[in-house]
Image (cartoon, rainbow, N blue to C red):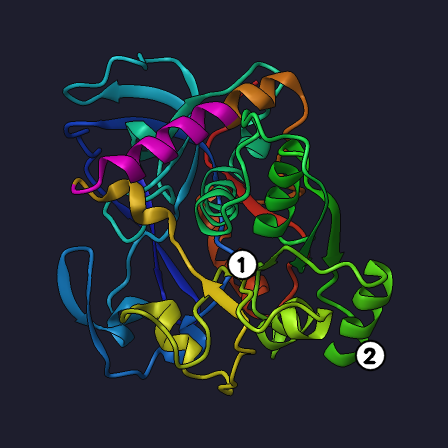
Amino acid sequence: MKEALVSTGPIVKIVDSPIPSPGPGQVLIKVVTSRQLSTWLGTKLASSSHILTFSGKRRKTSEIYGLESFNSGEDIAGLVHAVGPGVTEFKPGDRVAAMHMVGGSAGCYAEYALGQADLTYHLPEGTSFDGAATIPLAAMTAAVLVFRGLGIPDAWSANRPIEDTPFVVWVGASAVGAFSIQLARRSGIHPIIAVAVGYRKGGDVVVQAIRATLKGTAPKYGLDAVRVDRSNLSLATVLDPITHKASANERVKMAVVLPLPNEASEPGPAGLEAGLVESFKLPRGVEPIMLGVNLAHSPDDGFDRDFEFVYSRYMARDLQDGWFKPHPYEVQPGGLAGVQEGLRKLKMGHASAIKYVYRIVEIS
């Protein structure tokens, strides 16, 4: 099969590789469309000498970001080609979307890719492969942060409705931000205040505008979907219970997609990149929460796997029902040969509120 290997530059090399075989609990997918991640951390970390485990090997972060090239595609939409032992829900020919194990082998910048069966789901006929490719990683990240991190009740909870519970989303047009808004609305959260990434007047002005909009109502939840400049601090300032005349012991949760500066819980690419951002002190009443989608890949915690299994199927059903929508996207021409140009455009900051997707094969 053809496979695209990414290295710094960005430079992408198309190589011939063997078709992978699905192991227990895995699904081998013939890739129709793959989605490009929305961050470019490697431009700042390519010369780092930190050591961490990646794809089962101890490597320098400089190797992760290109001195040792790898297939970094994570979001898969396509047709089931084969299934591994223990997989009974899927069969060859099924239309599916899936999340590839982050940092694992057989990513989706290839003609065939491996997905975890727990994080693979059937696509309704009305959902295109292009749209489906925008969903798996970003939507599951949103679900983990909204429901596991912030503790917002699930949509099927008996406690609904839960209006008059303000939820502030910093950069609501990002994929994680937009999916978080969809999921929170489904749970009855209202009002939801979304901040645009391109505001011109600075974080302090936005903080005052949000407070004016809330008219004294204290925000219950907050989510920083991107971490732009000092957005963590701006959001924390909005959430600070003290500014809303709450008790000194009250705590408000703030979910973050990327680690806070100099407060990463463990080594990793995003944690190391956080060290490049100027550090600051959060208000005492704000509790930062960071959880990742790799929870489902841990065989040690069945609860985490159950959560992501259930929400994968839940979002698939709601695609069918029509209330859950894919993220806006732009098809990059050239298939695998277009990955290098897409990464270059991402590095230059050209992607805003959209996802770049690549059609590996054309399906009528």
**Left or right position of 252 against 81:** right
Does 278 sit above or below residue 244? below
Q: Tell me the element at label 1.
A: helix
- Mark 2 Cα shell of 10 Å, populated few (<14), some (14-19), many (≥20): few
Callouts 2 and 1 close, C-beta under 8 Å: no
**Left or right position of 163 against 63:** right
Question: Which quadrant is the N terminus positioned in?
Answer: top left
Q: Mark 2 points at which residue?
A: 201
Residue 270 point in image, percent of width and height: 39, 68
Pick whichever, 244 or 141, lies toward us.
Answer: 244
Q: At label 1, which amino acid type do we have?
A: Glu
Residue 331 appears in the figure: no
Question: Which quadrant is the C terminus positioned in?
Answer: top right
Pick whichever, 226 or 162, lies toward us.
Answer: 162
Residue found 56% across the figure and 65% down from its top: 250
- Mark 1 Cα shell of 10 Å, populated few (<14), some (14-19), many (≥20): some
Residue 236 point in image, percent of width and height: 61, 71
Residue found 38% across the figure and 53% down from its top: 292
Does 67 sit above or below residue 179? below
Q: Tell me the element at label 2.
A: loop
The residue range painted magenta reads: 300-314
Q: Distance between the residues labelled 2 and 1?
A: 32 Å
Residue 110 appears in the figure: yes
Q: Mark 1 points at which residue?
A: 341
Q: Is residue 310 magenta?
A: yes
**Left or right position of 15 against 34:** left
Does 342 sit above or below residue 30? below
Q: Residue 52 appears in which quarter of the rendering?
A: bottom left
Residue 181 point in image, percent of width and height: 66, 44
Pick whichever, 167 or 86, lies toward us.
Answer: 167
